[in-house]
Image (cartoon, rainbow, N blue to C red):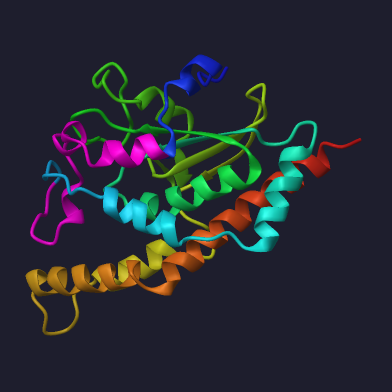
Amino acid sequence: MSIVTAERFARGMTFDEYVKYTGSAENLAREAFGSYFPDSGSMGAARKDNSGVLRERYAKVRLSDQQVAAITWLAAQPNGPAKILVISEDWSSDCRRDVPVLARLAEAGGLEIRIFNRDGKKILAQRRPDPAKFPDGNHDLMLEFMNTKNGGEWASLPVVVFYTRDFRELHRYIEYPAIYRKDAIRGHQQAVRPGETSAQAKERDAGVFLAMQRSPFFDIWASAGIDEMLAAMFEKLTLATP
């Protein structure tokens, strides 16, 4: 049985609340993922204020006419989507890419969106979340939506789950769209080139990765993620029809 109830869902943040929270002293006091920073090779690094990045992406991102029409149609169906649950951490580039466009999707379809942190004050430093060990996080939520890939389980972010009005799950999306072959791309970008030291490779990769985040491809992948979600919900509703 899912632990996502109406009461638990209501404890999440709206998009506006989440953006404000990311710039708050409370959030900035939490640990961040160390590899997000070029000069850090470990977890437990200081957090960066990403509220401005989220606001900027939200301001510029636009759904296509087809995406607006699709979410409007889906939301109007008897068992269509009514709520979106998101598990996010703002140090994640995948979350910064997708959460603002998810806010736009919720607005277009009249859906209620609630955003939850994955971690508490300490970042998840083990493969499998432990709610008893870190009760100030949302590890119990994360355990319900683990990412199974490459022969293992991962607490990947973001997690996006669409529910009907009465909290029946319609679709879950995790981390990135299929068209973004992230493992292959990031593996190539991070690999040490001939003649490079490990430190030089890390410095080069930091610049390349940042440039990629600022390129049109992040918007392409964000849009592709929305297309995947919409298509999956259409399929679910269509196949459920007698």
| In-image side of 85 versus 108 (left or right) | left
Could you say which quadrant of the image residue 142 lies in? top left
Could you say which quadrant of the image residue 161 lies in? top right
Residue stretch rendered in magenta on the structure:
16-42
Q: Residue 198: image x %, image y %?
A: 10, 70
Q: Residue 95: image x %, image y %?
A: 38, 49
- Residue placed furthest toward the bottom: 195
In reply to whether residue 111 is colored magenta, the answer given is no
| In-image side of 41 versus 54 (left or right) | left
The residue closer to the viewer here, 173 or 125, is 173
Q: Residue 76: image x %, image y %?
A: 77, 38
Residue at 11% x, 54% y is 41
Against 84, residue 228 (above or below) is below
In reply to whether residue 23 is colored magenta, the answer given is yes
The quadrant of the rendering that contains the N terminus is: top right
Q: How many marks?
A: 0
Against 124, residue 230 (above or below) is below
Q: Residue 74: image x %, image y %?
A: 73, 43
Answer whether residue 178 is visible to the viewer in this image.
no
Against 125, residue 211 (above or below) is below
Residue at 61% x, 55% y is 228
